[in-house]
Amino acid sequence: MGGPDFSRLSRPVEPLPKAVEDLLRAENLTEAYRSRPPYQQNDYIRWISGAKRPETREKRIRQMLSELRGGHVYMKMAWRGKKE
């Protein structure tokens, strides 16, 4: 089984930066990140990478990690997750 299918995204696909990947692994959130839909994974990385200041980047990373830990929030919006 391959990774997420990004083929339906209308925006450019952002690669996962090694530093963010390492943080996800250190926080045991890799699976939570990978279980999100491809558009959410891509949006998080575009949003983090778009920060101009290091402080803003760190704040966005902390928000993403917190949302992944909680599981029911995406970019400060309620998110129900995958339908079973």
Image: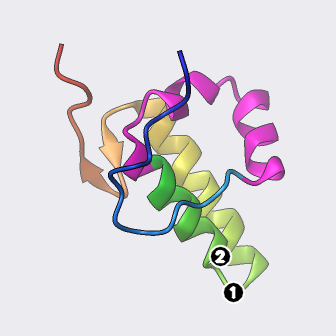
Residue corresponding to mark 2: 56
Which residue is nearer to you in this view: 34 or 25?
A: 34
Disc 1 crowd rating (10 Å Cα; few below 14, some 14-19, many 20+) is few
Q: Residue furthest front?
A: 7
- Start-end of magenta stretch: 17-40
Residue corresponding to mark 1: 52
Say which of marks 1 and 2 sits in front.
1
Q: Residue 29 placed where, x, y %?
A: 61, 28
Residue type of the residue flagged with mark 2:
Thr
Disc 2 crowd rating (10 Å Cα; few below 14, some 14-19, many 20+) is some
Q: Residue at x 65, y 71 (%)?
A: 49
Question: Quarter-wise, where is residue 5 in the image?
Answer: top left
Q: Residue 60 placed where, x, y %?
A: 58, 63
SS assignment at label 1: loop
Q: Residue furthest left?
A: 83
Residue type of the residue flagged with mark 1:
Lys
Which residue is nearer to you in this view: 14 or 49?
A: 14
Q: Residue at x 68, y 70 (%)?
A: 57
SS assignment at label 2: helix
